[in-house]
Image (tube, rainbow, N blue to C red):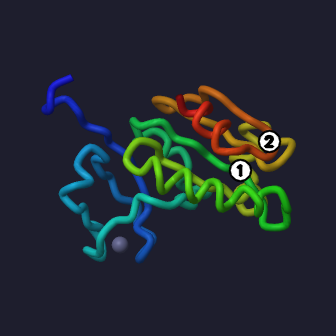
Amino acid sequence: MTQATDTRPAITRCVFCGKLNRVDLARLGDGPRCAECHKPMRFDRPVKVTDADFDTVIAGTRVPVLVDFYADWCGPCRMMAPILDEFAHQRTGEVLVLKLDTDASKASAARFGIRGIPTLIAFRDGKESRRHVGMADRRVLDGLVS
Ligand SMILES: [Zn+2]
């Protein structure tokens, strides 16, 4: 692969103003900034998505995407959170990690047939590639996006 073709477009949310930005994860070294508020974009943590923007983010992202379908009241989901944070941090620029609150975004949860949480679904080029239901350790997360 040549330098010119190594682009990794992704859509992610500015942690400061909440605006969705289209970025190239292959060029993180350039220090991309939010188009709206001009603050630096952060890529090292899970990004919250909702029914309103889920499809836009998945369709506009060409790196593997891992979505955590969770709920605030779910104990195993809370136990998963630090594992997911670390995963997002260590795979910055390679994998986009999203979190979807299944109580707030019922349409997406229904569309993907979420019956138990946490459910982790990996997407590639806009399509579901793998899923895992229940607690997952780091090895499982790496396997889902491999
Ligand atoms: Zn912003």
Q: Which mark is residue 69?
A: 1
* Image coordinates for residue 25, horizontal then vertical, percent: 31, 47
Q: Quadrant of ligand 1?
A: bottom left
Which quadrant of the figure has residue 85? bottom right
When the figure is inspected, residue 108 is found, relative to residue 42, above or below; the finding is: above
| Residue type, label 2 | Ile
* Image coordinates for residue 60, horizontal then vertical, percent: 40, 42
* Image coordinates for residue 103, horizontal then vertical, percent: 78, 61
Q: Secondary structure at mark 2?
A: loop
When the figure is inspected, residue 98 is found, relative to residue 13, above or below; the finding is: above
Q: Secondary structure at mark 1?
A: strand
Q: Residue at x 24, y 61 (%)?
A: 32
Q: Which mark is residue 20?
A: none
> Which residue is disc 2 drawn over?
114
* Image coordinates for residue 45, horizontal then vertical, percent: 50, 61
| Residue type, label 1 | Phe
Residue 82 appears left or right of 86: right
Residue 3 appears left or right of 32: left
Which quadrant of the figure has residue 16? bottom left
